[in-house]
Amino acid sequence: MAFESSLAFGIYSQTKQFLQVGSHSKQPQFSVIFPSGAFAGAIISFILCPSELVKCRMQVQGADSLLPGSRRYAGPLDCALETVKNERLTGLFRGGFTTFLRESMGNAVFFSTYEHVRYHMHRKLRDSSSGVTGLVDMGIGIVSGGLGGIACWSAVLPLDVAKTKIQTAPDRNHTRNPFRILKSIYRRSGLKGCYTGLGPTVVRAFPANAAAIVTWEMAVKMLGIRHD
């Protein structure tokens, strides 16, 4: 997660700077932010897919009928090696397309929400709180990052549900089409089924993303990097 977050923020920042070359607007530009976030998410999906496959399989073993109860992985490395042994190297990338969709869409929504909330909060609070700039910036980071995380997961949770089913299915021939899986879930459980786990996800999303944004903004300031 440390490597993934570092890469995501780095790619987003560099892509955003590249796309807004020549622009003098201080307002967040959706045409710049959305594709920058989507591109960052698309790149990190190739790193996330194998690690999340291992995580998901370790989490459901013995506690869910999706995996045979007789099999126990000794650890993450054992799980990865067994996957390669039984499904070849491509087995680690099962659910790759769904991860790609989730990360590209999710990061686009996250950064768009974060940038717009941050901009409008700065306009309202920065001028009237010049004496406590540091605290104001931290508060804005907490709110904008937290809301960005909630917006992100609210948008892509159905894809995450489908991804988990694809990655933990014991049948190698199980469909890997996330839309077909979601259609099946919707027929059986309605929209609620597509948003299984929404409560815990939202509860986690706010503090986790708020912490990520505050840390990122503090690091940018300490390193003397311009952050528009």
Image (cartoon, rainbow, N blue to C red):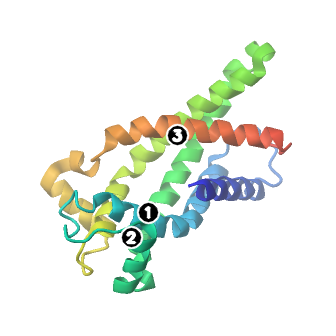
Viewer can see residue 200: yes
Q: On the rendered structure, is 203 left or right of 186?
A: right
Q: Amino acid at mark 1?
A: Glu
The residue under the point 35% across, 62% down is: 58
Q: On the image, which quarter does residue 154 sit in?
A: top left
**Disc nearer the start of the sequence (3/2):** 2
Question: Is there a contact, CB below 8 Å, between mark 2 and mark 1?
Answer: yes
Residue shown at 57% from the left, 36% from the top: 210
Against 87, residue 170 (above or below) is: above
Quadrant hosting residue 183: bottom left
Q: Nearer the viewer, mark 2 or mark 1?
A: 1
The residue type indicated by label 3 comes to: Ala
Q: Earlier in the sequence, mark 3 or mark 1?
A: 1
| Residue underneath mark 2 | 95
The kind of secondary structure element at disc 1 is helix
Please state which of residues 74 and 213 is positioned toward the viewer in this rendering. 74
Residue denoted by label 3: 208
